[in-house]
Image (tube, rainbow, N blue to C red):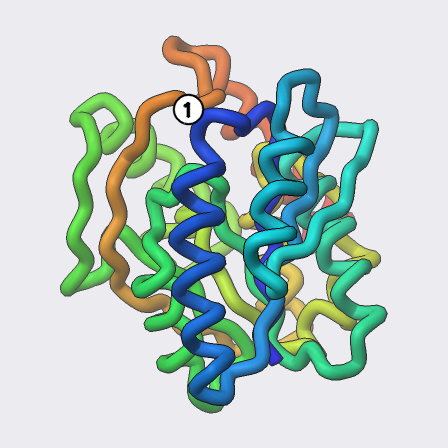
């Protein structure tokens, strides 16, 4: 069974086409034999996200939701993982951003290509990827990836693309050990996978930058992201 977490905070405008596309696509896949569920984790929303998600959960049987008071994408994803682990049928657990930068067809490609790996991550910079993104975001992304690879000796060209799938044993092993659920969340997951010897595949994807991003322009966010992974490296220093 494939379980997909979608963290959602104040996404009343962007999440409807996402849930329509994912609900319809994976409902068709369930008819073909792929058991699946989509768990939307609404967190700290003060708009109409909850009511929007409720509407789609009535339209599509595979869409469920959790409504939390605390916020944060990483925190919401972790709580989604924990909820899914209560279902023994869930053997593949993934997450995807609520803005549909990753289409359901491309998320399904991850599912089809995980093979014998413990996990698979979508990559906007692997050979074969197709990306629509502004030059400014491209530069920030490349800078962050350079710092991440230098600090953690990762082979991955892209740790931050918001579409990843892991086998159940991976989530069971790492979910209680994620130390930084904010900007370094994805890096934290991949570091824990490396630490425990899980083999993760990086797979080229099709990705389109969507309007309405919660990430602010300027230097504040890059500084927070850089600080997050430096803190993660210090918390896991080999010289501790």
Residue 60: image quadrant is bottom right
At 52% from the left and 67% from the top, the residue drawn is 165
Q: Where residue 2 sits: x, y (%)?
A: 57, 74
Q: Where residue 91 sits: x, y (%)?
A: 66, 81
Query: On screen, 12 above or below 87?
Result: above
Disc 1 on helix, strand or loop? loop
User: Is residue 230 in view from this perspective?
Assistant: no
- Residue at the disc numbered 1: 213
User: Is residue 55 in view from this perspective?
Assistant: yes
Query: In the shown orientation, is residue 45 left or right of residue 156?
Result: right
223 or 186: nearer the eye? 186
Query: On screen, 98 above or below 26?
Result: above
Q: Where residue 223 sits: x, y (%)?
A: 50, 19
Residue 127: image quadrant is bottom left
The image shows a total of numbered marks equal to: 1
Query: On screen, 20 above or below 116?
Result: above
Q: Quadrant of the N terminus?
A: bottom right
- Count neighbours of disc 1 (C-alpha within 10 A) and say few if under 14, some if 14 to 19, many if 20 or more: few
Q: Where residue 214 sits: x, y (%)?
A: 48, 21
At 82% from the left and 28% from the top, the residue drawn is 69
At 78% from the left and 38% from the top, the residue drawn is 67
């Amino acid at each position: 069974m494939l379980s997909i977490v979608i963290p959602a905070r104040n996404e009343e405008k962007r999440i409807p086409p996402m849930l329509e596309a994912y609900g319809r696509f994976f409902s068709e896949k369930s008819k073909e034999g792929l058991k699946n569920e989509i768990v939307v984790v609404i967190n700290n929303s003060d708009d109409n996200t909850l009511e929007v998600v409720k509407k789609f959960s009535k339209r599509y049987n595979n869409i469920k939701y959790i409504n939390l008071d605390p916020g944060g994408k990483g925190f919401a994803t972790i709580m989604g993982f924990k909820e899914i682990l209560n279902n023994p049928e869930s053997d593949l657990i993934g997450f995807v951003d609520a803005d549909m930068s990753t289409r359901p067809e491309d998320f399904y490609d991850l599912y089809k290509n995980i093979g014998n790996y413990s996990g698979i991550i979508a990559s906007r910079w692997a050979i074969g990827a197709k990306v629509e993104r502004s030059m400014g975001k491209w530069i920030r992304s490349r800078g962050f990836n350079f710092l991440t690879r230098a600090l953690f000796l990762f082979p991955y060209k892209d740790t931050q693309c918001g579409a990843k799938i892991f086998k159940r044993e991976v989530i069971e092993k790492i979910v209680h050990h994620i130390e930084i659920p904010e900007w370094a969340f994805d890096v934290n997951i991949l570091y824990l996978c490396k630490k425990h010897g899980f083999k993760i595949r990086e797979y080229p994807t099709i990705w389109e930058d969507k309007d309405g991003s919660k990430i602010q322009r300027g230097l504040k966010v890059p500084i927070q992201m850089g600080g997050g992974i430096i803190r993660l490296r210090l918390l896991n220093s080999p010289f501790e």
